[in-house]
Amino acid sequence: MSAKKGRHNGVDIVKVCTHKDASCRRKKKDNINKQQMTSVRNNFLKFDESFQPQNHTVELADGTRTNGAALRRGNAEVTLVDREGKRMKATLKKARYVPTYPQDIFSVKAATTNGASVNFREGHSELIHKSGTRFDIKDCAEKRIGIVYTQDQLMALRPPSFVVGEKPQIPKEREYREASIMCFTETWLHGLIPDSNVTIAVFTTVRAARDTTAAGKKKGGGLAVFVSNRWCNPEHIHVKERVCSPHVELIAIGLRPYYLPREFTNVIAITVYIPPTGKADSACDVIHSVTADLQTKHPGAFILITGKSDHNLVLLSPSYTPVVQQQPVTTVSDYIMFCTENSVPTKKVRCYPNNKPWVTSDLKALLNKKKRASFTAGDPAELRRAQKELKRSLKESKDAYRKKLEERLERNQTRDVWSGMRTITGFQKKGIRSADGNVDQANELNQFFNRFDSSSPSPSCPNIPLDNNGMSPIPPTGLSFTSGQVRRELERLNQRKAAGPDGISPRVLKNCPRQLCGILQHLFNQSLHLQRIPVLWKTSCLVPVPKKTHPVAPSDYRPIALTSHIMKVMERLVLSHLRPLVSPFQDPLQFAYQPKVGVDDAVIYLLQRAYSSLDRLNTTVRVMFFDFSSAFNTIQPRLLRAKLEKMQMDAPLVSWIEDYLTGRPQFVRLRSCVSDPLMSNTGAPQGTVLSPFLFTTYTADFQYHSETCHLQKYSDDTVIVGCVENGQEDEYRDLVESFVRWSRENLLQLNVTKTKEMVVDFRKSKSPPSPVCISGKDVEIVPSYRFLGVQLDNKLEWSTNTDAVYKKAMSRL
């Protein structure tokens, strides 16, 4: 005895027999091959009548036997008996030659062709073999008599063109039972068939019967969708659209499963059936219209479209690759935010403008006690006691706060001391609050801050996501960071700073350096290796800070960029590597962002050159103070790249710096709204670590220093000091003209209106100086100028500066 198994349109076919007879085996094999080729009814009508089943004994579970069998599909528990009488119990998977319930039109045709007949009764039916033996027709799995149709009803049915398996058969298949959703077409279901006849356990049924009036057909069609209750709550299943026409039948249902990837808000399953007589173009138009409408209403939905499968039962398991796995930077940032929200406790405290730091909770309780005593009539003694106790406690609280400030001053904590003094005096800076407005004003400010990008665009490199496979190799530049370096920089963060667009507070980074240094080291080295910076780290939140007390125009605001503190940690590590490489090419008269020099050195050097020049006879000193319009925002990445290459810097590191300056999303945040994001490819955001260093490097190729003239810089504040002897000012004017031409070539925009000149002349016989012309405009000559916070006048006296400091101190006191 043997078992032969084949595939028939996605369904297993099992034939069981003893095959003692050679002709039987040959005919049986031919018959199996023939039945594996097709499953339509006409082929069953051509059943091989010469086949003799005498050598294939089948005994049912109740002990009855038969030598002939009705054709069906399904599972059957049987006892197989060979000629020697040996019995063996077996379960035939999707067997075709076992008389079990339910019978269909194929079973009846096959049985009657071999001389057997089926006797249908109400509630009971039996198979009658040509020998006269009768066998009860039962469902071997359910052990019950099933629903029986009359023979006329069976003959009136037409076989469906799309067979996905019989309803009692699906719950027995593990792969189908564990499916999340099953979609069926051509169900042939109509309103007279209740849902209980087709419902599967733990599945919710959604049906769409064919509208005979709209479809123009009386029979066939119909759609059904089974949704697993373990995957989606039945209350979250809603029908979005139903369409029935001569060309297409469609049902769309909306689902909200228990779990969905964060990229999707819900699931929309669309089941489509196009009849053979339907027009494909018309059907496609309907499908496109419905899908487009659903995409508009649900832009974040995952839309699944299923359709006719040509009589096949298709089992699909979608392959999903989360986006966060392709963007490790976003994954790390989101996980840090997740841990922060779930681990760090938050507390809301209501603060009032008149709250003083020495007013403690105990003191507030005494204040409330005094108020209650004041409103209580007839007890003046209680009021006096409350006032006396309050006065004593208030004095003790003030003394305690005074001692606290003195201790901070002894420990050289000037920041805390100054903060306490401002609280005591009630001093508040004016004009430092962020701007307020609506979305239109925010977009206008964002366009203004990004105005230089439209006038001189720079080529930007496409952003490439960082690789997430393994640790990064050593970058080609030889530059790599260790976890110890990253940890030290994390510990140095200022936790008072505001969080950037990624929402990660520096307090979290500063207090968890040991846990974060490893993964951040990996991301930093990957960024250097790929010569790319993640977009999240380059995103800037611009906070407009007013330059004036009452700003009117967008030019009255200074954009302060809030960027990721993780990126600032990496910038400091890169800066420590770049500074020694670029220092030989830096301007020696650049006093900004240099170690051991500062504002005082710049002012002293300017005065020293002026004093030494004025010691000569018949000498005049002319000082030109240049002013740039948004100097940091006009850095051109392509020009900076060329300058860095001239400094013999590694090409991969230069590419990393160029990517740092290009493809930067930015948006403006006002007090109550944010603007639409814009992409910037020009300039460097103010408030970052590398921007000042890159600007000084960008302007380092223009240097001038002689005995009579020199050019000195403090960041973008540039000054030309010229010593004019006997009226010979050609060198001074040539230097000014050269600097203006260099600024134009490097796309730095001079603000001629704010550019001023101061002339220091102590000669007795003075002649009015001729003005210097820049871009067709004469530069204004002023008697005094505020340079780096110090008021300088044309007499080189300190009275003007002293008066300004005195007025400022008096206003604050």
Image (tube, rainbow, N blue to C red):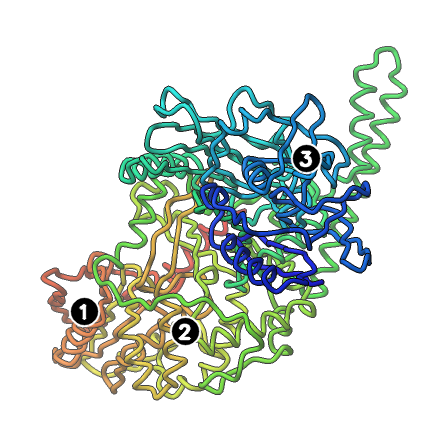
Left or right: residue 366 compared with residue 203 = right
- What x and y, as percent, mark residue 605? 37, 78
Marks 1 and 3, how far apart at CA? 102 Å
Badge 3 marks a residue whose secondary structure is strand
Nearest the eye: 723 or 581: 581
Separation of marks 3 and 2 at Cα, in angstroms: 95 Å
Q: Nearer the viewer, residue 232 or 165?
A: 165
- Residue on which disc 3 sits: 127
Give the residue type at disc 2: Phe
Q: Amino acid at mark 1?
A: Arg
Front of the two marks 3 and 2: 3
The alpha-carbon separation of the residues under discs 2 and 1 comes to: 21 Å
Q: Kindly identify which residue carries mark 2.
A: 693
Front residue of 237 and 373: 237
**Residue lying farthest front?**
131
Q: In this picture, is 673 found above or below 649?
A: above
Q: Horizontal and vertical percent for residue 8? A: 53, 54
Q: Name which residue lies at 25% across and 87% down.
A: 707
- At label 3, the amino acid type is Leu
Dot 2 alpha-carbon crowd within 10 angstroms: few under 14, some 14 to 19, many 20 or more: some
Numbered badge on residue 441: none
Q: Position of residue 129 (x, y in %)?
A: 67, 38
Q: Earlier in the sequence, mark 3 or mark 2?
A: 3
Look at the numbered disc 2 and give the secondary structure of its residue: helix
Question: Residue 270's spot in the image, x, y percent?
Answer: 45, 38
Task: Tell me if I can see residue 419 in this picture.
Answer: yes
Which one is earlier in the sequence, the residue at label 1 or at label 3? 3
Asked whether the residues under the numbered discs 2 and 1 touch, taking CB atoms below 8 Å apart as contact, a structural biologist would say: no
Quadrant of residue 114 in the image? Answer: top right
State which tag comes first along the sequence, 2 or 1. Answer: 2
Residue bearing the label numbered 1: 744
